[in-house]
Image: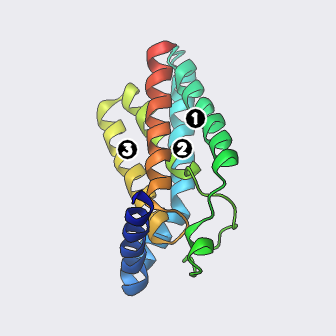
């Protein structure tokens, strides 16, 4: 049942990008730029915390590290094929045919967004909105199922919450 919902949502979102040239171009652009944007955001906040000698640098570094380790382990266990492999479709971006569950891009975007939120509510809201767009674009270009994004987002948020509340 859940897989049917996942496939249905994927086909609807992917269909929007494939069926509308403008939407397709936007989702490809968001997908291609998102890693760079989140890298710059993360690096800027790391440098700011170091410059200010702010001890929140510890959870700011630990949350993403923990999330990355957990996501890597889950990907080894589940080894779910990407939609373009499983459904025999063409993705709108070049991507390796490796595992997709959970999404490392969604996890990274959401752990950074949530970590930024702990430092600045308004900046965090903005970065979390960008994380949502990133996750949506990854589905629309054909490289992730919605559940890949959802679990990646949950891992990212929970890792950040745990890091900032435990460290």
Q: In the rendered image, which residue does mark 1 sit on?
A: 67
x and y, in percent, of residue 33 in the image: 53, 61
Which quadrant would the N terminus be assigned to in this image? bottom left
x and y, in percent, of residue 166 in the image: 49, 13
> Separation of disc 2 and disc 1 at Cα?
8 Å
Q: Residue at x 46, y 20 (%)?
A: 164
Q: In the rendered image, which residue does mark 2 sit on?
A: 108
Q: Secondary structure at mark 3?
A: helix
Q: In the rendered image, which residue does mark 3 sit on?
A: 128
- Of the numbered discs 3 and 1, the one sitting upstream in the chain is 1
Q: Quadrant of residue 21?
A: bottom left
Residue 111 showing in the rendered view: no
Q: Secondary structure at mark 2?
A: helix
> Separation of disc 2 and disc 3 at Cα?
11 Å
Q: Residue at x 41, y 61 (%)?
A: 136
Marks 2 & 1, CB-CB < 8 Å contact? yes
């Amino acid at each position: 049942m859940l897989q049917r919902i996942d496939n249905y949502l994927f086909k609807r979102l992917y269909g929007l990008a494939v069926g509308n040239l403008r939407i397709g171009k936007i989702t490809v652009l968001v997908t291609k730029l998102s890693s760079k944007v989140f890298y710059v955001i993360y690096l800027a906040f790391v440098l700011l915390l170091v410059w200010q000698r702010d001890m929140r640098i510890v959870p700011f570094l630990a949350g993403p590290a923990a999330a990355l380790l957990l996501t890597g382990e889950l990907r080894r266990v589940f080894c779910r094929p990407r939609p373009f492999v499983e459904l025999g479709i063409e993705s709108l971006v070049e991507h390796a045919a490796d595992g997709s569950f959970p999404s490392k891009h969604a996890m990274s975007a959401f752990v950074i967004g949530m970590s930024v939120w702990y430092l600045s509510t308004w900046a965090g809201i903005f970065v979390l909105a960008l994380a949502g767009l990133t996750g949506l674009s990854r589905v629309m270009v054909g490289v992730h199922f919605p559940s890949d994004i959802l679990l990646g987002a949950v891992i990212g948020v929970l890792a950040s919450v745990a890091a900032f509340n435990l460290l």
